[in-house]
Amino acid sequence: MAEEGQLFEAPDGNTLRLVRITDDLLEMEATYSGEGAMPPPHFHPSQEERFEVLEGAVTVVVDGEPRRHEAGEAFDVPAGTVHLGAFLDRFDAEFRIATDPPG
């Protein structure tokens, strides 16, 4: 079972740490080394996601539109919206992901 504080580390240097797990929210912090594969285009039928860039910069594709976000910026992905999990900038980045409901 997943626990708050649990850290997942990929061989390419990417990490995912579970920050908060409640009945209404899953909050994670991730670091992206600029290497390795990320999830393909996908959507969550009943989950909204909120991303906050903590360090670095990311470019994401949400509903077919590329968008660049830098440290201090946040963006939402509504439930049912196709988004590309690949962060296209080849920069180190750290970001927070909140999923509601946690699914």
Image (tube, rainbow, N blue to C red):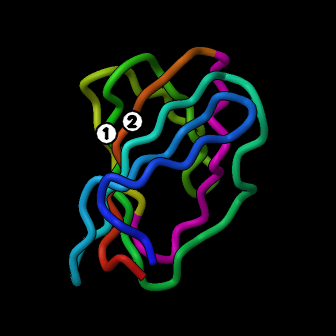
Mark 1, residue position: 52
Density class for disc 1 (Cα within 10 Å; few <14, some 14-19, many ≥20) is: some
Check residue 26 in the rendering and tell me which mark sits there, or answer none. none
Q: Which residues are magenta?
A: 78-90
Snapshot quadrant of residue 56: top left
Mark 2, residue position: 95
> Residue shown at 30%/73% (left/top)?
100
Depicted 75 relative to depicted 43: above or below: above
> Residue shown at 36%/20% (left/top)?
55
Of residue 11 and residue 30, the one placed in the foreground of this image is 11
> Residue shown at 51%/34% (left/top)?
67
Residue 92 lies within the magenta run: no
- Kind of residue sitting beneath label 1: Glu
Tell me the quarter of the image containing the C terminus.
bottom left
Residue 2: where, in percent of width, then height? 43, 71
As helix, strand or loop, the secondary structure at mark 1 comes to strand
Tell me the quarter of the image containing the N terminus.
bottom left
Q: Earlier in the sequence, mark 1 or mark 2?
A: 1
Most frequent secondary structure within the magenta stretch:
loop
